[in-house]
Image: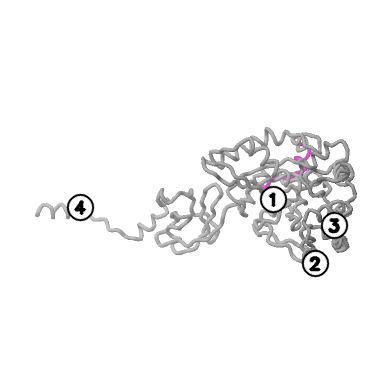
Amino acid sequence: MLNREDWIMIHDMREKGCYLLDIATKVGCSERTVRRALKRGGPPPRRRPGVRPSKLDPFKPLIDRMLSEEVWNAEVIYAEIRARGYRGGRSILRDYIRPKRVLRKAKGTVRFETPPGRQLQSDWGQIDTVVAGAPFRVHFAVNLLGYSRRFHVWAAPCEDAEHTSESLVRAFEWFGGVPQEVWVDNQKAAVLSHEPDGTVRFNPGFVQLAEHYGFVPKACRPHRPQTKGKDERMVRYVKENFFQRYRFFESLAHLNQQLEQWLVEVADERVHGTLKVLVSERFAGERPELRPLPLVRFDTSYRESRRVALDAFINVAGNRYSVPAHLCGERVTIHRSLDGGLKVFDVHGVLVAEHRLRPAAEGWQVVPDHHARLWQDLGVQARSLAAYEEAATWS
């Protein structure tokens, strides 16, 4: 139950423009409780001072000292006083800590507005839905421009490095340009580690993507997702809006078609709650500040190495694909695109074969010209049929 101090804090934070979720986190209650407190005409009556001593009383000096040392996690404090003999519950401890949270040092969660063309925030979400008549866990990337709040969504089967890069490439193409910075969370697809000196070690593939498009990669501090809170809220918006409207999809391609239609008809035409302006209109002012797209699209394919067998085939994903016969026994590099294309390159980087990935049930994939040299090397002798006709006559 909220006390008078909680009610005053909730109304004060709301008047300052704080989000309901941030208020609930600060007070230590649910968003529903915050909404009820905002609708209430006045603060709850003061409680009568109790005359019975509390089990917490002997431990309050220790609790106050821990709070002064910026230890605000109730579970951590509970474990500490429990080890020192406290036998009360958690609720009384939380009730004691809650009104003191106004003394907690701010963590810098005030909204930070970026200039047009400056920043893009990238994040992934997951949701269970139905694709092709079967339950399917969809991973979707949300890439949002910090100034205009326009965003792009792309659904994928997983969140690996290749799909992360593809989601950003599609977002740049959707916006028609590239921002100066791209902020990501700490998924291994983009960030390998945060070094003790404060530097960030990015995934090499993500660095190549940044160099190709000319943006500066940025990473949130660990356990600090508020750095890109705008995008966190858009992940929830996609779940609570799009995936509440649409629940069945013929395929991932169909899902992405529905997403793009929804972006144009709904997401781009929403009036942003903070900015009080249409997102599409706000984007019109940001579009000229984006950097132009490069002439060549970044290759987001999976890259692997294979050795060509003596029959001029390579094995890929459970099936076999032909390559030119002169490469028998040599190493080649394959690029498997996310849409099912297969390209084969020799050691010099020259494209030597192209296929579409097929299931093994459809048989080996062969380009006849690839094996022409093999038939020549066999040296098959061509004989006249006259000798066989003569033998047949004598018999």
- Mark 3 Cα within 10 Å, few/some/many (few <14, many 20+)? few
- Label 4, secondary structure: give it: loop
Kindly report which numbered mark, 3 or 1, lies closer to the viewer in this rendering.
3
Tell which circle, 4 or 2, labels the residue nearer the N-terminal end: 2
Tell which circle, 3 or 2, labels the residue nearer the N-terminal end: 3
Residue 37 image point, x, y percent: 82, 40
Tell which circle, 1 or 4, labels the residue nearer the N-terminal end: 1
Give the CA separation, mark 3 to mark 1.
62 Å
Q: Quadrant of the N terminus?
A: top right
Residue bearing mark 2: 84
Residue 219 image point, x, y percent: 74, 56
Residue bearing mark 4: 385
Residue bearing mark 1: 213
Q: Amino acid at mark 2?
A: Arg
- Label 1, secondary structure: give it: helix
Kindly report which numbered mark, 4 or 3, lies closer to the viewer in this rendering.
3
Q: Amino acid at mark 4?
A: Leu
Which residue is painted at 56% across and 42% down in the image?
252
Residue nearest the viewer, comparing 224 with 276: 224
Kindly report which numbered mark, 3 or 2, lies closer to the viewer in this rendering.
3
Give the CA separation, mark 2 to mark 1.
57 Å
Tell which circle, 4 or 3, labels the residue nearer the N-terminal end: 3
Which residue is painted at 78% across and 61% down in the image?
87
Residue bearing mark 3: 54
